[in-house]
Image (tube, rainbow, N blue to C red):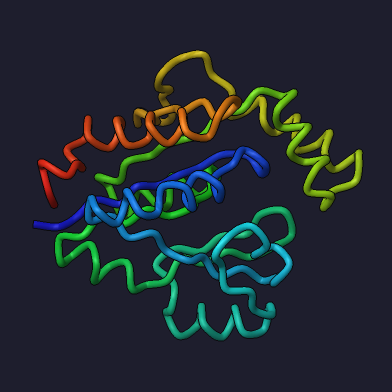
Amino acid sequence: MSGRLVYLMGPSGSGKDSLIEAARGALKALGVTTVRRVITRSAEAVGEEADGVSSQIFAERQARGDFAMHWQANGLRYGIPASIDATLAAGGHVLVNGSRAYLPQALSRYPDLLPIVLRVDDAALRRRLVARGRESSADIDQRLARNAGFASDDASVQMAGVIIEVLDNSDALERTLEALLQLLANYGISATAGRI
């Protein structure tokens, strides 16, 4: 039986990379592989286990079919290695740091993927963006405006008929990690359930 793709989304600064890093050991115990993204700027890899490449190398890898999924956002190109297909086919689960704008294409390729969005309140997001020092004030304001598209008070939201689970990461990372592991268990990805 094939494994499940866990597709984690959230605005820049929501803490996706921190959550993935904090969850790495627990996810491995559940048979969930976390995958390094390929990004067209090495500086973007700070805080995330990613492979930074030039635009030319990215285009060459894309042309070779090295990516299962790829998209462009914030002036950068992102790719998820095609190796995830072999992992899924072998029954392993895979967690990727995805893009909400790319979700329809991801669902087309992986119809049973589990979409999860990290929500973060504006105050926490502003603090994180200022602290990392990558964006100007205008860029931060734009990211905060985009954050409104991710906001929801519900435990899940619907997008094109697909239920997207929502985790709030405005507070302690440990709470978000607990909520993520519980959510995965709710979908049959747990130490007792093993691989689906």
Towards the viewer: 160 or 51: 51
**Residue 27 % position (x, y):** 32, 51
Residue at 64% of width from left, 78% of height from top? 53
How many numbered markers are drawn? 0
Residue at figure coordinates x 84%, y 48% from the top left: 135
Residue 129, picture quadrant: top right
Estimate the x, y position of residue 151 in percent, counting from the top left.
59, 23
Assign the N terminus to one quadrant of the image: bottom left
Relative to residue 47, is residue 87 depicted above or below?
below
Q: Is residue 82 left or right of residue 2?
A: right
Using the image, determine if residue 139 lies above or below residue 66. above
> Based on the displayed image, in which of its 4 quarters is residue 144 positioned?
top right
In this view, the residue farthest toward the right is 137
Q: Which residue sits at x=31%, y=57%?
A: 94
Q: Is residue 90 left or right of residue 53?
A: left
Q: Nearer the viewer, residue 136 or 28?
A: 28
Residue drawn at 67 percent across, 31 percent down = 147
Is 152 or 21 nearer to us in this picture?
21
Which residue is at the far top? 153
Where does residue 2 sit, x and y in percent of width and height?
15, 57
Q: Quadrant of residue 141?
A: top right
